[in-house]
Image (cartoon, rainbow, N blue to C red):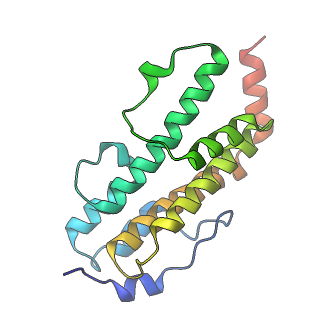
Amino acid sequence: MAAYYTYLISSLPMLQFGMEPPFSFEGFIERCQGLIPDAQIDTLKMVPEVWAYEGGQPTLKKWRTFDKKLRNELVKLRAARKHLDPVKYLRKDGYVEPYIIHIAMGAIRNTSILEGEKMLDEARWQALEELSLGHFFDIDFLIIYAQKLLILERWERIRIADKTQLLQEVLSENP
């Protein structure tokens, strides 16, 4: 029988793409401590390292599959641009849905690297929304919430980065 974490999940703020994260991923894990079993905490801790996850949790497996297919399409497109063979960079996958190919092509063709990355993360966010269907108060909801929180943290780091200093560092490295 599935466990439900009604109190914990109802106390979490809603997340929307582009917002400032309400707390860090580590803060999220701390909020979950004592409210869900340790085995579930361990599963949540695997969310940032989904590539290393070997368990059978269905939502983590579906997320890893989607992200792997998207990354493989990006590898194929980037390798084609550089006239390289992408095979050694690909992770084993299977059939790739056409919408994933479309997402990757749109991001690669964008003239702004930042806007391309935003397109990719918006697509990831949408995939997480689709994975969340039917999951309201279970571990799957918490896994999806954790992954969304990681996306928000990434964009917060980009937002607060000192762009002038980064540009100066890049320019000083390439005379």
Is 81 drawn above or below residue 105 in the view shown? above
Q: Position of residue 33 (x, y in %)?
A: 30, 73
Q: Which picture quadrant has residue 131?
A: bottom left
Residue 27 in view, yes or no: no
- Residue 45 vertical position relative to residue 106 in the rendered view, above or below: below
Q: Is residue 46 left or right of residue 90?
A: left
Quarter location, residue 1: bottom left
Name the residue nearer the viewer: 118 or 73: 73
Of residues 122 and 158, the one nearer the viewer is: 122
Name the residue: 65% across, 65% down: 20
Task: State whether residue 28 is above or below residue 173.
Answer: below
Q: Position of residue 159 (x, y in %)?
A: 71, 52
> Seen from this angle, which residue lies furthest top?
175
Residue appearing at x 39%, y 74% in the figure? 31
Quadrant in which residue 126 is drawn: bottom right
Q: Position of residue 148 (x, y in %)?
A: 52, 62
> Residue 132 appears at what percent x and percent y?
46, 71
